Amino acid sequence: MTKKNWIVFGCLVGMLILLMVMVYFYIVPTKSTEPKVDISVVVYGSSTGRWTAFKEGVNQAAKDLGAMVNFVIMEGTDDCQEQKELLTREVDNGAKGLVVAVADSEKMSDYLVRISNSVSVVLVESEIDLENVIPCVKADAYEMGEVLAKHVLAQTDDEELIKILPVEDNRMNQKERLEGFMDEMSEACRKVERVDRHEEKDIRKIIEKEESVTFVALNDKILEQIADILGNRQSNIKLYGMGSSERIVYALDRGVISEIVFQNEFIMGYEAVDALIGSMRKEDSKDIKTIAHHQVSTETLHLQENEQLLYPIIH
């Protein structure tokens, strides 16, 4: 090969390499130079598996949006002092933003307003008493109560006894669920008896006394408890409720629970982190972000769309 041909060959190789480099940078997006942000997620305590799908949503959003997350579950369910101490600790340890599932909507209000002056805060599931002061990602709790009531009405006789279990009214969403349920029952002129106590011995007394009864539980903790009490009992006892924890889905699959209404926990976690990071980057809005809620029965549990909602880790 002559010297001239070598020069031409070298130029062609060089142009080819340059073209490949240009194509690479055009096709493959460059990694974001946006620094990762430190955020903390602090939720009230509950049963094992209560926050599984929610945490998956949080982790996926953190991965997609560039965040370092510390996920904290309280030891108690409604200890406001514990939650305040945990939130203060997270901020002191460098968290620049907080996602919070409040232990008590009223008692946490003033504290959360104060702390939101120094770090970004987004609530999930339930607002605080001071309306729209802090953005919240939640399902329509009143509507969830209405939907559950409609399904109970459709599947019970007019004379059938309906007993609603105690509501933890320290969170606004619990009050709203109850209000929606009771309003729908009242409109249908159906009587609902409230159970004052939900210890095992009290529930067993009701079961032994009544030939046919329908129990309704408006949160995951009590729904799980009643499902455990009923076990595989073959009787005219029906159980409806709200929640989508692993234990609840298992009880639904076995037919111990007839039907559930639940919020999309995975989306709630994802949207909360998205809203928080938007707030930290000055893209915030004080609007309430409403997420979807769904209804699933024992018969519809294994439809593909329902399995995708209730088993987000697998799918």
Image (cartoon, grey):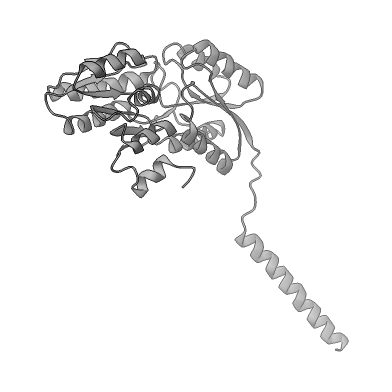
* Closer to the camera in the image, 12 or 166: 166
* Residue 80 x/y as whole percent: 49, 12
* Residue 6 x/y as whole percent: 84, 83
* Residue 41 x/y as whole percent: 54, 27
Looking at the figure, which quarter contains the N terminus? bottom right
Q: Residue at x 41, y 27 (%)?
A: 125
Does residue 198 appear in this view?
Answer: no
Q: Residue at x 39, y 44 (%)?
A: 307
Please determine whether, in this image, residue 64 is positioned above or below residue 80. below
Please determine whether, in this image, residue 53 is positioned above or below residue 48. below
* Closer to the camera in the image, 9 or 65: 65
Please determine whether, in this image, residue 7 is positioned above or below residue 195. below
* Closer to the camera in the image, 230 or 137: 230
Please determine whether, in this image, residue 1 is positioned above or below residue 194. below
Q: Residue at x 36, y 44 (%)?
A: 306
Say left or right for 102 vs 97.
Answer: left
* Residue 300 x/y as whole percent: 30, 43
